[in-house]
Amino acid sequence: MPTEGEEQQNLPDAEAVRAATRRRLRQPVPRTNRVCPRFSDPEWSLLQRAADQAGLAPGGYTAAAVLAAAASADPNAAVADYRRGIQELMESNRQLGAVGNNLNQVAFYLNSGGQPAADLRQLLQRVEASIAAVDGAVAWMVRR
């Protein structure tokens, strides 16, 4: 039978118990609501890197980021940057489609014997530059 001193040595101290439960100081009771997000491998790598930089576990970092976005004055702004970028690219694509329609009309005019305007070459260069810019933005969004 262990003596009183041996029993005290086997019992964990209060600090060890607190560290093992890892209860947040501001949360005296466990949280009952859960969200379980799933991530692709590249997304998980980004999350782990960001969590490491913040000194948090991935779950804690995710919770902090979500709560910060939800508590902001405009939660949509915190989350919607990516979505807004996609919408803007879709709008650019629509506008380039309209430009393509106009170019078809120009080609029809020229093929039927019309004379090109003096600034047609400059206009075509601007269209090419616009297409290249949209392509670059799409590539950036994909890498993101």
Image (cartoon, grey):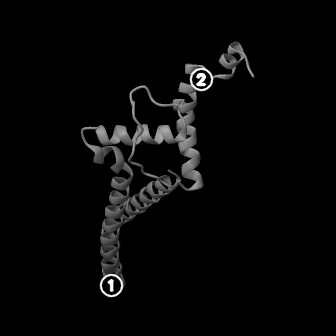
For the residue pair 82 and 60, the one nearer the viewer reads as 60
Locate residue 130, reporting x and y percent: 39, 59
Locate residue 129, reporting x and y percent: 42, 58
- The residue at the point 53 percent across, 25 percent down is 18
Residue 38 circle label: none
Identify the amino acid type marked 1: Gly
Report whether residue 32 is seen. yes
Locate residue 97, reporting x and y percent: 34, 71
Identify the amino acid type marked 2: Ala
Residue 113 circle label: 1
* Residue named by callout 2: 16
Q: Residue furthest top?
A: 5
Q: Nearer the viewer, mark 1 or mark 2?
A: 2
Locate residue 5, reporting x and y percent: 69, 13
- The residue at the point 38 percent across, 65 percent down is 124
Q: Residues within 10 Å of mark 1 (few under 14, many from 20)?
A: few
- The residue at the point 42 percent across, 51 percent down is 35
Q: In the picture shown, does residue 91 fall above or below 102?
A: above
Secondary-structure class at tag 1: loop
Q: Residue furthest left?
A: 73
Q: Residue furthest front?
A: 1
Q: Quadrant of residue 83?
A: bottom left
For the residue pair 21 and 134, the one nearer the viewer reads as 21
Q: Are marks 1 and 2 in contact (CB under 8 Å)?
A: no
